[in-house]
Image: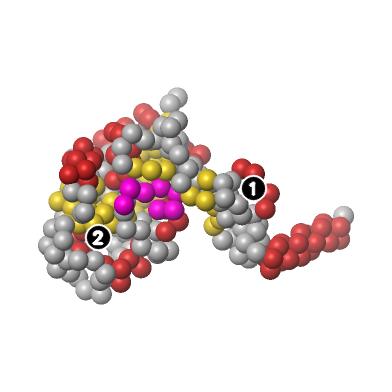
């Protein structure tokens, strides 16, 4: 049976998030789905993998619930399945994405959404517009829109001080993987006084489905599952540079020192060198020696 990965979100008031969490846990588990679902008082955000028929049945259940208005959702489909996720996780959080603002704001009063075709035309016709990448640095490192501002952040909430560097009077367009972060951010920016804010409706995933690698996107789209990097065609080009040489790559590996585990960009030729520095190499060697010693003792 064919498998797919389903990505979606919707900002819609949820009266009882904990009751919605219990319902989502049952609905996903009964259909053999894997992935993650986040519920908040503002709505739902999810990425799920499984049999296509089960996902389609899940959508029917989602849209018929009385716990919130989850109709008319913009669904994103991509290749993959159940095994691309380590487990099923359904949680309640304060926010769908953690911006952690210091004050309340209207999350439903977001910027103007631009469909992929509209986004493409807007960028071409407005070459001086500010294009803001709402993702983390390791995401934008392997793929981004041309000319985008890419804040050096490790977590979404770290983007707030970077907003102070932007011109509030100038039109701004912002994007992220599936649109949930940039829609939420655009609402926050309007609250902070930005006059003319737009966001990419459906995110990079929808733009890639429309334009593949023939548009204004370069590189690979970072995704939070086993795939890590999602290419939109066979013409996709690596734009990031290997940590250990000058080769281009889109592949991430964790430092082999388990106490470090830092994310490293590694090309095919350097995959055996995945340690950050000399200190990590020494610690890795010590770990291997301790492991051999423990095995010998057991034997």
Give the labeled residue for mark 1. 271
- Neighbour tally class for label 1: few under 14, some 14-19, many 20 plus, Cα within 10 Å: some
**Residue, far bottom:** 102
Is 35 within the magenta?
A: no
Q: Position of residue 20 (x, y in %)?
A: 28, 53
Q: CA distance from mark 1 to mark 2?
A: 36 Å
Image point 38% across, 43% down: which residue?
218
Give residue 276's quadrant in the image. bottom right
Q: Nearer the viewer, residue 198 or 187?
A: 198
Disc 1 or 2, which lies upstream in sequence?
2
User: Is 279 above or below relative to 37?
Assistant: below
Label 2 SS: helix
Q: Nearer the viewer, residue 195 or 215?
A: 215
Q: Nearer the viewer, residue 228 or 292?
A: 228
Q: Which mark is residue 153?
A: none
Q: Position of residue 182 (x, y in %)?
A: 26, 55
Residue 230 visible at all: yes
- Quadrant occupied by the C terminus: bottom right
- Quadrant occupied by the N terminus: top left
Label 1 SS: helix
The reply, left or right, for residue 262 in relation to residue 219 is right
Give the labeled residue for mark 2. 185
């Amino acid at each position: 049976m064919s498998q797919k990965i389903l990505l979606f979100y919707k900002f819609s008031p949820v009266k009882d998030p904990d009751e919605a969490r219990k319902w989502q846990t049952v609905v996903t588990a009964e259909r053999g789905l894997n992935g993650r679902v986040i519920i908040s008082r503002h709505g739902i955000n999810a990425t799920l993998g499984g049999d296509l028929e089960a996902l389609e049945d899940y959508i029917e259940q989602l849209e018929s619930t009385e716990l919130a208005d989850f109709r008319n959702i913009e669904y994103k489909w991509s290749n993959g399945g159940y095994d691309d996720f380590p487990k099923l996780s359904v949680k309640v959080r304060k926010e769908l994405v953690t911006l952690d603002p210091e004050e309340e704001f209207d999350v439903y009063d977001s910027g103007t959404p631009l469909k992929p075709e509209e986004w493409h035309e807007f960028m071409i016709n407005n070459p001086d517009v500010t294009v803001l990448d709402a993702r983390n640095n390791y995401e934008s490192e392997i793929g981004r829109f041309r000319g985008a501002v890419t804040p050096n952040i490790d977590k979404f909430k770290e983007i707030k001080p970077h907003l102070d560097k932007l011109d509030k009077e100038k039109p701004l367009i912002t994007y992220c993987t599936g649109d949930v972060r940039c829609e939420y951010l655009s609402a926050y920016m309007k609250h902070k006084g930005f006059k003319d804010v737009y966001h990419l409706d459906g995110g990079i995933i929808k733009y890639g489905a429309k334009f593949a690698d023939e548009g204004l996107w370069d590189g690979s789209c970072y995704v939070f599952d086993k795939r890590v990097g999602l290419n939109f065609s066979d013409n996709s080009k690596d734009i990031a540079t290997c940590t250990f040489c000058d080769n281009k790559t889109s592949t991430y590996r964790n430092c082999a020192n388990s106490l470090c585990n830092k994310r490293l960009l590694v090309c095919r030729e350097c995959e055996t060198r995945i340690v950050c520095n000399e200190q990590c190499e020494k610690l890795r060697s010590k770990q291997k020696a301790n492991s051999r010693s423990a095995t010998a003792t057991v034997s």
